[in-house]
Image (tube, helix red, strand yellow):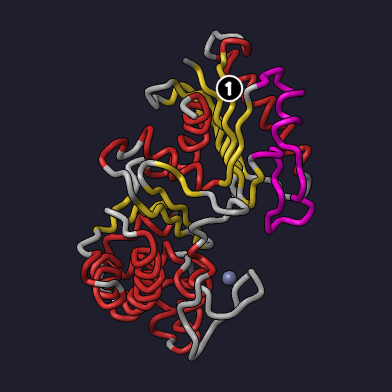
Amino acid sequence: MLIGAIDIGGTKTMLGIINSDGIILSKIQFPTDTTDFNLLILFACEQLKKCVLDLGYEMKEMVGIGVSLPGMVDRERKLLVRSVYSGWQDFAVSEIIQKITGIQNVIIDNDVNACAIGEMYFGYKKTYRNYLWVTVSTGVGGALVCDGKLIRGASGCSGEIGHMKVEYEKPLPCPCGELGCLEAHGSGTAIKHYLEQEIAKSSDFANIFNRKGLTVDAAGCAVLAKENNRIAKSIYNKAACYLGRGLGYGINLINPEVVIMGGGVSSSLNIMHDVIMDTIAITVNKALLPVEVVHTKMGYNAAFLGAASLVLDNFNQ
Ligand SMILES: [Zn+2]
């Protein structure tokens, strides 16, 4: 069974062909040009066609195309309702892809929802039936799976833990327009913000980045934290404390077996794990513990495999 997968992220788009066992037969990646959504979809569809032909198949052999999108998705009306990128609203994504590719079975969903569904098919599979799937990268997103089913909520936004308030005393501004959200305090963007503050305070610390040629961001900070640099570790501890708070609220609410983390910053989960677990321990009702926080089994391909899983999941509805 051939499944087309298109994962449109804010910085990169990944697309290709996957079989029903989750084996990636073909995959390409390119930077996402957020200026014109129509052009982006057109280009993605052309690339997908090329992937199919390069494998020696025909488009009609593909059973469907799954698409994960960085924004709010209306599954009933098959629309990308809104996103943080200007002009990306009320887009009939399925219809456009159907027209360009000739494939009628096009399933779209929000990227974190797609990751949470993907985990059931290609990640931990049946190991867990109740979990909170969290992505920590530029922002923080979440999705809830209860009794083996994704919870969507009234407008498809269940589990959006990124905008729960985790700081009231010294709240930082969040891209959503509010103050003190988990996304503002525990994301990769927040880690970069703390890092810039520390670099401004200490020329010695700034010099380490220059000397080692590290980027001034969460990834650069992680390199130093892994080398036990005191300031870099304190930055990650701060973000981990806020993540622990946010995850704790989610755990109290849905009583999961596990929290599964993906996204770029999740590759540094081992640096943050102890502080996250300590914070969860003081945030969560003891009756709901223990709850482990683990890295997704889909790794870097989470949203890409998640996109493909949308097609399989739709067959099982
Ligand atoms: Zn927010």
Closer to the camera in the image, 274 or 125 = 125
Give percent across and percent down for residue 255.
Answer: 32, 59
Quarter of the image where one finds residue 122: top left
**Residue 212, visible in the rendered structure:** no
Which residue is at 31% across, 56% downward? 256
Which residue is at 56% across, 39% downward? 7
Q: How many marks?
A: 1
Mark 1: amino acid: Gly
- Is 99 situated above or below 53? below
Give percent across and percent down for residue 271.
Answer: 28, 65
Asked if the beta carbon under badge 1 is closer than 8 A to the nearest atom of ligand 1, the reply is no
Give percent across and percent down for residue 216.
Answer: 48, 69
Which quadrant contains ligand 1?
Answer: bottom right
Residue 88 on the magenta segment: yes
Q: Is residue 186 left or right of residue 294?
A: right
- Is 196 situated above or below 104? below
- Is 21 situated above or below 231? above
Label 1: which residue?
64
Which residue is at 27% across, 72% downward? 285
Q: Is residue 218 left or right of residue 76?
A: left
**Residue 3, visible in the rendered structure:** yes
Give percent across and percent down for residue 169.
Answer: 48, 91
The residues colored magenta run: 76-104
Q: Secondary structure at mark 1?
A: strand
Which residue is at 21% across, 67% downward? 287
Binning the other alpha carbons within 10 Å of mark 1 as few (below 14), some (14 to 19) or many (20 upward) gives many
Residue 94 on the magenta segment: yes
- Is 98 situated above or below 77? above
Quarter of the image where one finds residue 280: bottom left
